[in-house]
Amino acid sequence: MIFVAVFLPWLALILRGRPFQGILCLILQITLIGWLPAAIWAVLVVNNDNQDRRHREMLNAMQR
């Protein structure tokens, strides 16, 4: 997913269930200068979602 976030940041955001951020990211990515911030933003979102998922899994495991 990190690969997608770097090369197609808008798609990574849409696949993570954030369609409005994905559209905004696509608009940002259309400009060549905006591609780098869009890619960084998408990587941060993907990493944050992965951390949230791991955190939820750990809490569920502790509650069992």
Image (tube, grey):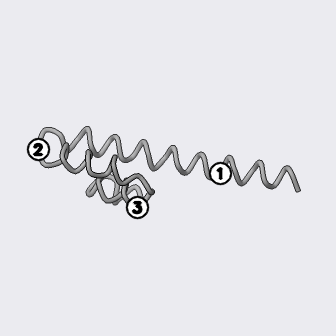
Amino acid type at mark 2: Leu
Q: Secondary structure at mark 2?
A: helix
Residue drawn at x 26%, y 38% is: 37
Assess whether mark 2 and mark 3 are in contact (beta carbons under 8 angstroms): no
Q: Residues within 10 Å of mark 1 (few under 14, many from 20)?
A: few
Q: Position of residue 41 (x, y in %)?
A: 34, 41
Q: Earlier in the sequence, mark 3 or mark 2?
A: 3
Q: Is residue 64 left or right of residue 25?
A: right
Q: Earlier in the sequence, mark 1 or mark 2?
A: 2
Assess whether mark 2 and mark 1 are in contact (beta carbons under 8 angstroms): no
Q: Secondary structure at mark 3?
A: helix
Q: Is residue 19 left or right of residue 63?
A: left
Pick the front one: 61 or 16: 16
Quickly name the residue at label 3: 15
Q: Earlier in the sequence, mark 3 or mark 1?
A: 3
Between marks 3 and 2, how big is the CA–CA gap? 23 Å
Amino acid type at mark 3: Leu
**Labels 3, 2: front one:** 3
Between marks 3 and 1, how big is the CA–CA gap? 18 Å
Assess whether mark 1 and mark 3 are in contact (beta carbons under 8 angstroms): no
Quickly name the residue at label 1: 54
Quickly name the residue at label 2: 32
